[in-house]
């Protein structure tokens, strides 16, 4: 009997083991008083014929009752462990646990889900060498109980206990027909249990569409690597993968949408579907962890988008990567597309364009992939500005840029923009923007020196320009600079090796005019960093 992948791993603990033990010992202790037909009902076991090639032993899927069935098998292992190997009952228990005329996985009468199998096989073969697992803990629990005494203060007899299990424990076996859907029945039997995640549901459905013999191979080759690669990000990946069709998929609808889309796919083609999903998971890993990308320029572009935190573009990135995998999108084109998307996001942010349309916009762009034309198509589609695709032009961008309160927004984005401007100078002299902190040139708290500085009107300047880009820079001396007078700040900024500070050091005074002039110069730089067609 096989525990299918849609079942959870073995989960019973001490409380459940103790309950089973108490039920068995109740009959063991009163064996002489029990009528011959006395029994204890332990529940139902629901099985279904496995879809497999008719080779070896007949195979059945355990649809319900796997926790109980597995625990009984562990109990039998513990009882057998207390018997001489040459004893008749020892061999009898072995035949209950093993198909002794077979080898490989056919050797075992019960096989848990794939992640549990190594520990299970080890327990059956030699408990003394079995690695730590819940199976081993259950085995040791029953061994410890077997070493105890009964109600008459006599050592527990393993032979008599085995007879009690054989004669008194009753289960109902329900075997489904070949035309019954075992997964639907599993869902109906377990709807009150711990909810399965969307990724669990997807995995179970896809693998159940395969022949039982192919499930292990596909699981090991494609699903398990994908699961280990993405871990907690797996459910979100499947959702983003499905959205490549250009339709939004809610987080709770991933399984139902995938099932609907694959109903028309024949079972013979399901391995290819899972293989494509696995291939796309590699691309998704690139998107959420660019460190895994070997191409340095591509890694840099992906890292920048990741820092900007615009996850609404991920379905489009997956679509672009699919084109990249087929050769329709070159490395250079993919980098161009990433820069276009970044420019689109940054310009809209500076100009205060609401973000609630971004998901719909990116989902509408799935058709841009075309050999040799992908970047051009993406640029043209966004530049048209139709359907809410507002990509602010230079005039609008500059007007917003000058007085945009960059520091009062998410600080990470402020740092990203300042680092990008520094990098755009292409001349660092040892300065590392990523290690620097954000410095307000006119400080957040005005000292007497700042209030009395030439140019006057310090309060008004402070109110209007404090958090704008013209008054912000990068420095390694943030805590030291603090509220220092402008002359002192200039001296320290001159030693910082950051190009952003050259225009600050060149100023005699720091007032509204100086701040606005610097913002204008930085805007010219920004318009090139986040370029847009005229």
Image (cartoon, rainbow, N blue to C red):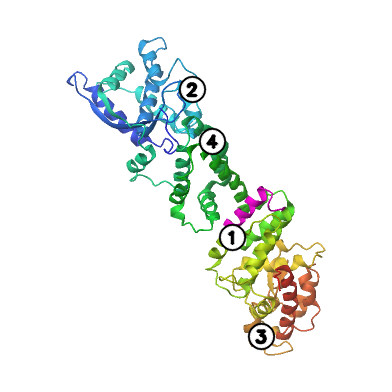
List x then y, in percent, for residue 530. Answer: 70, 68
Q: Secondary structure at mark 2?
A: helix
Pointer 3 or 4: first along the chain: 4
Q: Residue at x 53, y 58 (%)?
A: 246
Kindly report which numbered mark, 1 or 3, lies closer to the viewer in this rendering: 1
Pointer 3 or 2: first along the chain: 2
Per the image, the residue denoted by label 3 is: 461
Within the image, what quadrant is residue 9 found in?
A: top left
Pointer 1 or 3: first along the chain: 1
Q: CA distance from mark 4 to mark 1?
A: 30 Å
Per the image, the residue denoted by label 4 is: 218
Q: Is residue 151 visible?
A: no
Pointer 4 or 1: first along the chain: 4
Q: Please, which residue is most extreme toward the bottom here?
A: 456
Kindly report which numbered mark, 3 or 4, lies closer to the viewer in this rendering: 4
Kindly report which numbered mark, 2 or 4, lies closer to the viewer in this rendering: 4
Per the image, the residue denoted by label 1 is: 313
Q: Image height check: is 198 above or below 397?
A: above
List x then y, in percent, for residue 247. Answer: 50, 58
Count neighbours of disc 2 (C-alpha within 10 A) and say few if under 14, some if 14 to 19, many if 20 or more. Answer: few
Q: Secondary structure at mark 3?
A: helix
Q: CA distance from mark 3 to mark 4?
A: 66 Å
Q: Is residue 348 left or right of residue 47?
A: right
């Amino acid at each position: 009997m096989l525990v299918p992948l849609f079942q959870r791993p073995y989960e019973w603990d001490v409380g459940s083991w103790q309950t089973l033990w108490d039920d068995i010992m109740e009959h063991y202790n009163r064996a002489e008083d029990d009528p011959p037909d006395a029994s204890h009902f332990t529940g139902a076991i629901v099985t279904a014929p496995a879809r497999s090639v008719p080779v070896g032993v007949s195979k059945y899927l355990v649809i319900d009752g796997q926790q109980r069935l597995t625990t009984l098998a562990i109990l039998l292992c513990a009882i057998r462990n207390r018997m001489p190997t040459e004893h008749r009952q020892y061999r009898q228990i072995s035949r209950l646990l093993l198909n002794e005329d077979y080898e490989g996985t056919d050797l075992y009468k019960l096989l848990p889900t794939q992640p549990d199998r190594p520990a299970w096989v080890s327990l059956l073969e030699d408990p003394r060498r079995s690695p730590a697992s819940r199976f081993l803990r259950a085995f040791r629990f029953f061994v410890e109980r077997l070493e105890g005494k009964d109600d008459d203060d006599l050592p527990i007899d393993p032979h008599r206990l085995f007879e009690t299990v054989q004669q008194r424990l009753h289960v109902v076996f329900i075997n489904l027909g070949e035309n019954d859907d075992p997964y639907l029945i599993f869902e109906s039997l377990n709807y009150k249990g711990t909810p399965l995640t969307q990724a669990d549901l997807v995995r179970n459905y896809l693998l159940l569409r395969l022949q039982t013999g192919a499930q292990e191979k596909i699981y090991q080759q494609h699903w398990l690597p994908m699961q280990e690669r993405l871990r907690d990000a797996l459910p979100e990946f499947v959702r983003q993968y499905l959205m490549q069709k250009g339709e939004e998929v809610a987080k709770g609808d991933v399984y139902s949408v995938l099932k609907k889309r694959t109903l028309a796919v024949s079972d013979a083609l399901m391995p290819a579907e899972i293989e494509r999903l696995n291939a796309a998971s590699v691309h998704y890993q690139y998107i959420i962890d660019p460190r895994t990308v070997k191409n340095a320029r591509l890694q840099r572009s992906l890292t920048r988008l990741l820092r900007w935190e615009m996850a609404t573009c991920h379905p489009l990135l997956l679509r672009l990567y699919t084109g990249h995998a087929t050769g329709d999108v070159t490395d250079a084109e993919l980098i161009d597309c990433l820069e276009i998307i970044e420019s689109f996001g940054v310009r809209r942010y500076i100009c205060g364009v609401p973000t609630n349309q971004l998901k719909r916009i990116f989902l509408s762009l799935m058709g841009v992939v075309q050999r040799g034309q992908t970047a051009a198509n993406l640029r043209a589609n966004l530049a048209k500005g139709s359907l809410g695709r507002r990509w602010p032009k230079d005039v609008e961008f500059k007007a917003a840029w000058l007085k945009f309160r960059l520091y009062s927004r998410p600080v990470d984005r402020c740092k990203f923009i300042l680092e990008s401007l520094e990098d755009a100078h292409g001349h660092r002299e040892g300065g590392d923007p990523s290690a620097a902190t954000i410095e307000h040139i006119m400080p957040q708290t005005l000292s007497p020196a700042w209030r009395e500085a030439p140019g006057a009107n310090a309060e008004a300047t402070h109110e209007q320009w404090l958090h704008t880009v013209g008054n912000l820079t990068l420095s390694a001396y943030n805590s030291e600079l603090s509220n220092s007078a402008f002359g002192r700040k200039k001296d320290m900024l001159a030693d910082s090796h950051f190009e952003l500070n050259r225009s600050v050091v060149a100023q005699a005074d720091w007032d509204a005019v100086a701040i606005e002039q610097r913002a204008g110069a930085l805007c010219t730089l920004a318009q090139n960093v986040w370029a847009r067609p005229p």
